Image (spheres, grey):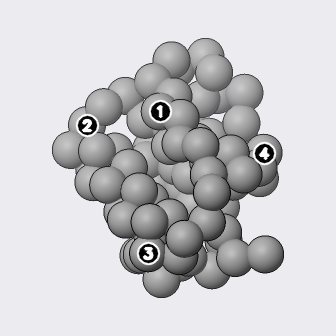
């Protein structure tokens, strides 16, 4: 599973990355987290407000910090 946290590195983006990491650890799901800070790469996902979370190529959250429960629901197969 590949999870991308999109954002320039602002406090909300860092908090989103921490929540995603915690959710993965708690769920015991093997996943790779990538932080995407390049504006052009972020725009390719159709995202213009950050933070955003992409799970296996699908945008799951835009412009807000997701809850840990939300992230867990996205990563359970």
Left-right relation of 6 to 40: left
Between disc 3 and disc 4, the foreground one is: 3
- How much space separates mark 2 and mark 3, taking CA atoms? 25 Å
Badge 2 is on which residue? 10
* CB within 8 Å, label 1 to label 2: no
Mark 1 nearby-residue class (10 Å; few <14, some 14–19, many ≥20): some
What number is the disc on residue 24? none
* CB within 8 Å, label 4 to label 1: no
* Element class at badge 4: loop
- How much space separates mark 1 and mark 2, taking CA atoms? 12 Å
Badge 4 is on which residue? 57
Residue situated in front as seen by the camera: 65 or 25: 25
* Element class at badge 1: strand
* Between discs 1 and 3, the one toward the N terminus: 3
Q: Is residue 20 above or below residue 28?
A: above
Quadrant in the picture for the C terminus: bottom right
* CB within 8 Å, label 2 to label 3: no
């Amino acid at each position: 599973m590949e999870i991308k946290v999109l954002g320039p590195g602002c406090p909300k983006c860092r908090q989103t990355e921490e929540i995603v990491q915690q959710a993965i650890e708690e769920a015991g799901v093997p996943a790779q987290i990538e932080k995407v800070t390049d504006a052009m790469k972020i725009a390719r996902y159709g995202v213009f407000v950050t933070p955003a979370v992409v799970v296996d190529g699908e945008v799951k959250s835009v412009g807000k910090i997701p809850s840990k429960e939300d992230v867990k629901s996205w990563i359970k197969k």
